[in-house]
């Protein structure tokens, strides 16, 4: 597991700590979503997990290895991969396959193993046909997949994603989210920063941050049941969850622990018949946050 204990961190030019007394554990195979207002410390926290930053106080331990011990850094960064918000900050190769090979090559692996890892990673993200392409010719979504492939080539046990769907068109966004879910199904632990509540489907745990601290930790159903607490933090609850709660307030006997349209369709259909067409209508006022 990744175990964080009494973690504090400050940037050199700031007097106030960015991270304050963080306690948390991330277990192998989990899918954890990390949410919170802008500037609350989410990105700084995940950079601690793969030792890009070192604690100013407290400890971060990855599979028994302390991130403050320099002899552990190479192994920690293999085990905890990171996909940055802007893929252009992560892609360094002249071609897609050169970029994916960069990490394994820096590990000093034999050429045959590097070739095998590159080919396998590109197939996993569906980008094998783009192996000879220059990264600058790719779309935003394709660049995200290449950056994921570069992380996969390091054979990680955990991957931290920093807003991986930001600035993507709907098709690319869906493709990246499907890839995240696929990686989780294959046993890789996911730590996923997002501001879009619709990206949380598949997460089995939410961590909510505010002003450098983790203020809520629980299942999505538990966290989103605390509507007033979320509003106080300036965070939204998924619209479909709000819809189910308002229907229940109107007297409908419905489960309100609903996070996706498909779940809502199944729940409501069990009461009144098929409704997917209604809920899928993006112009429907029924899911307006203000009712």
Image (cartoon, rainbow, N blue to C red):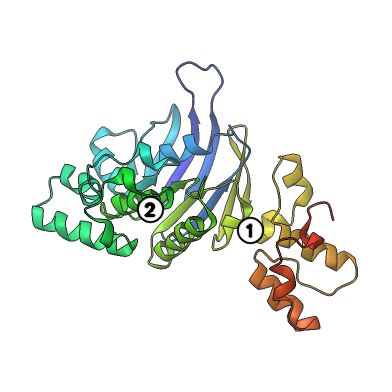
Name the residue carrying label 1. Answer: 220
Report the front residue among 257 and 137: 137
Q: Is residue 134 left or right of residue 212?
A: left
Residue 243 position, x and y percent, is 78, 62
Do labels 2 and 1 touch, CB within 8 Å? no
Report the front residue among 273 and 186: 273
Q: Is residue 229 left or right of residue 9?
A: right
Residue 290 position, x and y percent, is 83, 51
- Which dot, 2 or 1, sits closer to the camera? 2
Residue 246 appears in the rendering: yes
Question: What is the secondary structure assignment of the residue under circle 1?
Answer: helix
At x 21%, y 53%, the residue is 132
At x 54%, y 34%, the residue is 41
Q: Quadrant of the C terminus?
A: bottom right
The Cα–Cα distance between marks 2 and 1, rounded to whole angstroms, is 29 Å
Residue 75 in which image quadrant: top left
Judge whether 59 appears above or below 103 on screen.
above
At x 30%, y 45%, the residue is 135
The disc, 2 or 1, on the residue closer to the chain's N-terminal end is 2
Residue lying furthest front: 137
Q: Is residue 66 left or right of residue 97?
A: right
Name the residue carrying label 2. Answer: 142
At x 70%, y 75%, the residue is 276
């Amino acid at each position: 597991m990744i175990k964080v204990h009494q973690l504090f961190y400050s940037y050199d030019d700031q007097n106030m700590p960015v991270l304050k007394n963080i306690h948390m554990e991330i277990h192998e195979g989990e899918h954890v979503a990390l949410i919170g207002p802008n500037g609350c410390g989410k990105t700084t926290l995940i950079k601690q997990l793969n030792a890009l930053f070192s604690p100013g106080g407290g400890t971060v331990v990855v599979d028994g290895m302390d991130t403050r011990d320099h002899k552990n850094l190479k192994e920690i960064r293999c085990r905890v991969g990171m996909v940055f918000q802007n893929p252009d900050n992560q892609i360094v190769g002249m071609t897609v396959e050169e970029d994916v090979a960069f990490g394994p090559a820096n590990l000093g692996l034999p050429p045959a193993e590097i070739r095998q890892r590159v080919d396998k990673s590109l197939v996993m993200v569906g980008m094998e046909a783009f192996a000879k392409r220059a990264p600058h010719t790719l779309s935003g979504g394709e660049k995200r997949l290449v950056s994921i492939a570069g992380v996969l080539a390091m054979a990680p046990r955990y991957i931290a994603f920093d807003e991986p769907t930001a600035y993507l068109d709907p098709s690319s966004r869906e493709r990246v989210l499907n890839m995240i879910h696929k990686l989780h199904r294959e046993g890789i632990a996911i730590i996923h920063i997002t501001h879009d509540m619709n990206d949380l489907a598949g997460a089995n745990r939410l961590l909510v941050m505010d002003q450098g601290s983790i203020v809520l930790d629980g299942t999505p159903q538990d966290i989103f049941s605390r509507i007033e607490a979320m509003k106080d933090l300036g965070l939204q609850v998924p619209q479909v969850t709000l819809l189910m709660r308002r229907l229940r307030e109107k007297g409908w006997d419905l489960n309100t622990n609903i996070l996706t349209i498909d779940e809502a369709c199944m729940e409501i259909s069990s009461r009144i018949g098929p409704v997917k067409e209604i809920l899928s209508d993006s112009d429907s006022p029924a899911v307006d946050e203000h009712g």
